[in-house]
Amino acid sequence: MPTRQALSRIPLNMVLSLAFLSITTFTQAQPWVITDQAHSITSPGPARIILLDQQQHLEAELSRALPTNPHQAAAIIQSRLNTPSGKHLQTDLAKAQQDLTDAWSLGITKIPAVVVDRRYVVYGEPDVAKALVLINNAKGQPQ
């Protein structure tokens, strides 16, 4: 196991480049499916599912049955966030926010959308397998 001193000699930009490369490689291998809970999709295998309304649903879960008094409501929310399920909810909220950012960065305009290599997109096809065939045909790749 490398020591802290040995790790500190590795240039930060190299570490960040390698981390970005590994993340980019992973995300390119997996299609992204961008939709919401009202638009169901069928996915044939591994895909990153981005639900654009997930953050709203999680926030609604967090704020369910709160009193109208803002001080009491704030105390209840803090109490909820300090439980194991509250910590899980915070992680889910962070993921939902990242998903929204990623969809926005791609310029997605309609749902459902199937995205490959962060470059090719098919809109309106809820069957991911069919969307992937369309993308592969457009890329000139055999099926």
Image (tube, grey):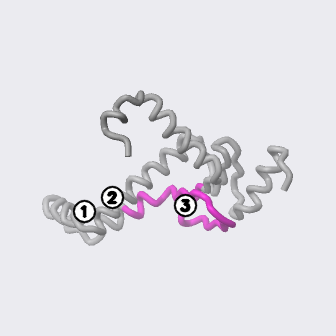
**Could you tell me if the residues under marks 2 and 3 are in contact, i.e. CB atoms within 8 Å?**
no
**Could you tell me if the residues under marks 1 and 2 are in contact, i.e. CB atoms within 8 Å?**
yes
**Could you tell me if the residues under marks 3 and 1 are in contact, i.e. CB atoms within 8 Å?**
no
Q: Nearer the viewer, mark 2 or mark 3?
A: 2
Q: Where residue 63 sits in the image (x, y, percent)?
A: 29, 65
SS assignment at label 2: helix
Of mark 2 and mark 3, the one earlier in the sequence is 3
Q: Where residue 12 sits in the image (x, y, percent)?
A: 40, 30
What's the amino acid at mark 2? Gln
What's the amino acid at mark 3? Asp
Mark-to-mark CA distance, 2 and 3: 20 Å
Of mark 1 and mark 2, the one earlier in the sequence is 1
Mark-to-mark CA distance, 3 and 1: 25 Å
Q: Nearer the viewer, mark 3 or mark 1?
A: 1
Is 4 a magenta residue? Answer: no
Mark seen at residue 90: 2
Residue shown at 68% from the left, 63% from the top: 126
Residue shown at 38% from the left, 46% from the top: 1
Residue shown at 51% from the left, 55% from the top: 52
Q: Where residue 81 sits in the image (x, y, percent)?
A: 25, 62
Q: Which residue is mark 3?
A: 36
Spot the residue most to the bottom. Answer: 65
Left or right: residue 49 compared with residue 134: left
Is 45 a magenta residue? Answer: yes
Left or right: residue 111 compared with residue 9: right
Mark seen at residue 81: 1
Dot 3: few (<14), some (14–19), or many (≥20) neighbours within 10 Å?
Answer: some
> What range of the chain is rendered magenta?
34-58
Residue shown at 59% from the left, 55% from the top: 34
